Amino acid sequence: MSTLRFKALAQLPFIDFRKDNAVEVPKKLSELFCENVFSEETMRNYLTKEAFTSIQDAIKRGTKTPRHIADQIAVAMKDWALSKGATHYTHWFQPLTGSTAEKHDSFFTPFESDRAIERFNGSMLIQQEPDASSFPNGGIRNTFEARGYTAWDPTSPAFIIGTTLCIPSIFISYTGETLDYKTPLLRALSAVDDAATDVCRTYFDKNVTKVTATLGWEQEYFLIDTALYQSRPDLILTGRTLLGHSPAKGQQLDDHYFGSIPTRVMNFMKELEIECMKLGIPVTTRHNEVAPNQFELAPMFEETNVAVDHNSLLMDIMARVAHKHHFHILFHEKPFKGVNGSGKHNNWSLATDTGENLLSPGKNPKKNLQFLTFFVNSLKAVQEYSDLLRCSIASASNDHRLGANEAPPAIISAFIGSQLYSVLEELEKVTNGKLSPEEKTELKLNVVGKIPEILLDNTDRNRTSPFAFTGNKFEFRAVGSSANCAEPMTVLNAIVAKQLRTFKNQVEELIAGSKLKKDEAIFNVLREYIKECKNIMFEGDGYSDDWASEAEKRGLSNLKTTPEALKMELNEKFVSLYEELGIYNHREFEARNEIKLEKYAAEIDIEAKVLSDIARNHIIPAALYYQNRLIDNVKGLKEIFSESEYGDLAKDQMDIIRSISYHVSEIKVGVDELLQAKEDANSTHNAQEKAERFCNEVKPRFDKIREASDALEMLVDDELWPMTKYRELLFTR
Ligand code: ADP
Ligand code: MG
């Protein structure tokens, strides 16, 4: 029977990964750094001074690159790429499918009948036209222009993979609507730069001319032996196991976390690090995660746009390198029931071009007030726009993780540590209006002045908060491991930009209207923010039920599912935020909301189909086969034993036979109901309603089928069980 599982298992002992795939790490990894990147250093070597200055301006200041310079850069890029053995180039972009896309064109250009050259010029660098009609567009391109184009993003460096020069690009329709993750992100980053620079220059430091949002992500993932992965249709088609009984040994012992890394995994990691180095992804840490076969990788933080590109690129590279080591990589947020899921913490801060971290206090009262300003404004932004932040991480796969006792709940709250919290409590008492000289001194020296000391000893960590301050940055922990960081980063930077604008307006009003001094006005505005923010601040256990009821009392949203969250997204307040900052127009925003809803429904739909197929074609036949064996056995007992003895001897088998029938019928009925519910849901045309039906009427029906199947897994002879088991998937290294 279940040949696939056993064929897969039979392969394991015969593959000696340890020897075959040992990876030689060069003495100095740093020598490989940026080897395959068209980096600043490379540009310096390949470009004229004029072109170099121009492109650096484009990167650092967002200035436009003149056409003749683009031509020079294109030639330089081509020469460099050819010297590295590249034959093709592609615009590399991130459509709303969630993965990266590329369309390769050859440098090779024939001319006359028998001659050819390698050609690449400014216009080829600047723009490409992929056949874009099949990328998600939420109806935009059906009703409007059908074509889209990609355009070079000079702020993220080009790189070579294999024999292809990849040029990071944005993707837009001919009518100007954004069709990717990068374009809105770039706009949000520019908005936060403008707003934060303005606040810095007006109140704290005239020398600041640019503020960069920084992002350091931490990527969690599972590695599963390829043969075993191939034996599970649910993993192949949905990225997670839809069935499977928990193994006897799980993560109870916590022995995997920070334990030694298995040899095969170590080889994978070494090779991955070499590839990352060459591509300029500054990975620094690697370790085991909580669950068996779960790991994490984190780089040094970078400018957000580059960090997002690097994360997308990394996910591609990881899959390829894993394959070489006979692993399949799982980025799904919850591949295994009862086993810790995966996330992608987004560490975020703001840095000035004068070298300061705005979320880090400084050496004098002014710097500390600057810290406090950016710190409180960040909290206020989260408080004002918590539902939008929730929407930015909503997906069918992340729904399994949020609130599942291992990841932050779907309630957006912030953790700042008890000592910082008490500083804010003192600031709440700041006098309304003008402050006496004594109060000012007290505030600057003893209240705000204490902050650096407090943060030096910032051991206060809370792992259960979705948005935690960790000393010199905020960590947004609710982002899913399979997500593109661009969306949460677009939202976070946009809301902080908007908040900083509001802040500046309010301070200016107090200065002009109430004749307050600058510092007085700032303290007055921050005092009000602190009061308003208190409802999202939570220092306790975010996983507890108490918090859910406490949050409800405070009036916080608890949007547990994707459709619930997305229903809140098209709120007027959010639409006007995006319009004000020039990030999306109303229609683009609606289109994106619809794409997410459609994706949600489609994913549950696929899961329903896969689960039904496996249950009917694999589980029921195996259960009946085994039941027949038991029936034969019982019949045999009856033949050879006396009536009285037989009754006793056959009793337990009869019980199992009965249980099997019971579970098989549960599966049969469950699948019928599931398929009917799925059909009903599919007859709905409104995207919101359809997603809700998949969420409320289809998905809950998975449980009954799974429970029955997992019960059968415990009854049926291991030799007959068709699905590769959790213990095999999770403990093969
Ligand atoms: P953990 O969250 O596991 O305790 P750390 O606190 O060491 O780990 O840092 C996690 C991540 O935070 C790293 O990826 C690092 O690059 C990132 N990080 C550190 N400083 C900043 C910053 N100023 N801006 C953005 N990310 C940062
Ligand atoms: Mg972390």
Image (spheres, grey):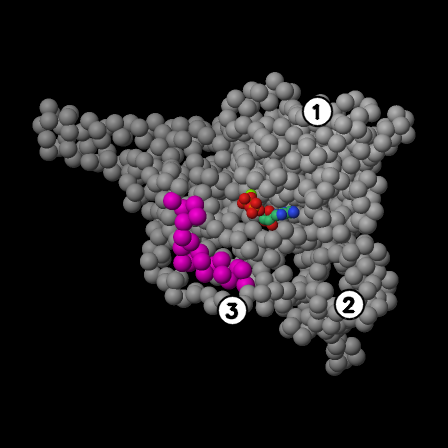
Q: Report if the beta carbon of the residue with label 1 is closer than 8 angstroms to ligand 1.
A: no
The residue nearer to you, when weighing 646 against 116, is 116
| Residue 591 image offset from top left, x and y in percent | 73, 38
Boundaries of the magenta span: 255-274
**Residue 26: numbered disc:** 3
Q: Report the residue marked by disc 2.
A: 74
Give the amino acid type for the residue marked by disc 1 in the picture.
Glu
Q: Are discs 2 and 1 less than 8 Å apart at CB?
A: no
Q: Residues within 10 Å of mark 1 (few under 14, many from 20)?
A: some
The vertical placement of 75 against 104, above or below, is below
| Residue 642 image offset from top left, x and y in percent | 9, 27
- Answer with mark 2 or mark 3, whichever residue precedes in sequence: 3
Report the side of 572 relative to 6 (left or right). right
The residue nearer to you, when weighing 321 against 629, is 321
Q: Report if the beta carbon of the residue with label 3 is closer than 8 angstroms to ligand 1.
A: no
Tell me the element at label 1: loop
Tell me the element at label 3: loop
Report the side of 448 relative to 230 (left or right). right
Q: Report the residue marked by disc 1.
A: 428
Tell me the element at label 2: helix
Report the side of 15 relative to 315 (left or right). left
Give the amino acid type for the residue marked by disc 2 in the picture.
Ala
Q: Are discs 2 and 3 less than 8 Å apart at CB?
A: no
Give the amino acid type for the residue marked by disc 3 in the picture.
Pro
